[in-house]
Image: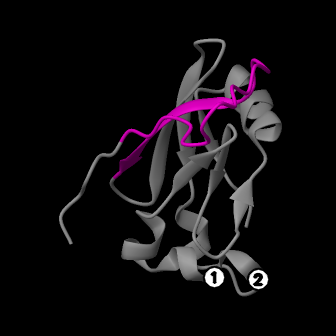
Amino acid sequence: MPNQTTTQENPAAGVTPAAPWRIHAVSVLPDYRLAVTFRDGSCGVIDCSSVQTTDRPGIFGPLADPEFFHAVRIELGVLTWPNGADLDPAWIHENISTEKTWSVPF
C-alpha cells in the first residue's frame, strides 16, 4: 500500500473541542507514524511502530495492519480507529511538548 497522507478535521457537527491539547489535524506518515497538530498550534510526530512487535497489544492489535492504521480519525479532538482504540490527546500533548517525537509504549 502506498504511503498516504490524510488530514482530518473534527467531524462531529456542531462540537468544537476547545481544550488546547485536543488534536486539530492528523497526517499518516510512513513507518507507523502520525503527524499531529493541536488546537494550541503545537505539533509533533507520534511513533506507533512498537505496535508491530508488542506481545500484548490488546485493542491496539489491529493497528499492526497498515490499512487499519491508516483508518485513524479525529473524534472530538481524540485520535481514534474503527475498533474503538484511541490515544489520549492530553498524554500525547504532554510528551510532544518536551520532545517533538514521541514513541507510544504499546
Quarter of the N terminus within the rendering? bottom left
Query: Label 2: few (<14), some or many (≥20) within 10 Å?
Result: few
Q: Is residue 78 above or below residue 18?
A: below
Find the distance from the CA under tag 2 to the CA under tag 1: 6 Å
Point out residue 84 in the picture as x, y percentages from the top left corner: 70, 70
Residue at disc 2, secondary structure:
helix
Q: Nearer the viewer, residue 23 or 106?
A: 23
Q: Is 5 situated left or right of 78 in this image?
A: left
Q: Is 83 situated left or right of 47 in this image?
A: right
Magenta highlight range: 7-29
How many numbered marks are there? 2
Residue 58, which numbered label? Answer: 2
- The answer to whether marks 2 and 1 mark residues whose Cβ atoms lie closer than 8 Å is yes
Q: Is residue 14 above or below residue 46?
A: above
Q: Magenta segment, principal secondary structure? A: loop
For the point 60% across and 37% down, which residue is it? 13
For the point 71% across and 59% down, which residue is it? 86
Residue 91, which numbered label? Answer: none
Q: Is 53 situated left or right of 28 in this image?
A: right
For the point 33% across and 45% down, which residue is it? 6
Residue at disc 1, secondary structure:
helix
Q: What amino acid is found at the position of numbered circle 2 in the picture?
A: Gly
Q: Nearer the viewer, residue 20 or 94?
A: 20
Residue 61, which numbered label? Answer: 1
For the point 60% across and 67% down, which residue is it? 50
Magenta stretch holds residue 76: no
Query: Label 1: few (<14), some or many (≥20) within 10 Å?
Result: some
Q: What amino acid is found at the position of numbered circle 1 in the picture?
A: Gly
Point out residue 33 in the picture as x, y percentages from the top left corner: 46, 51
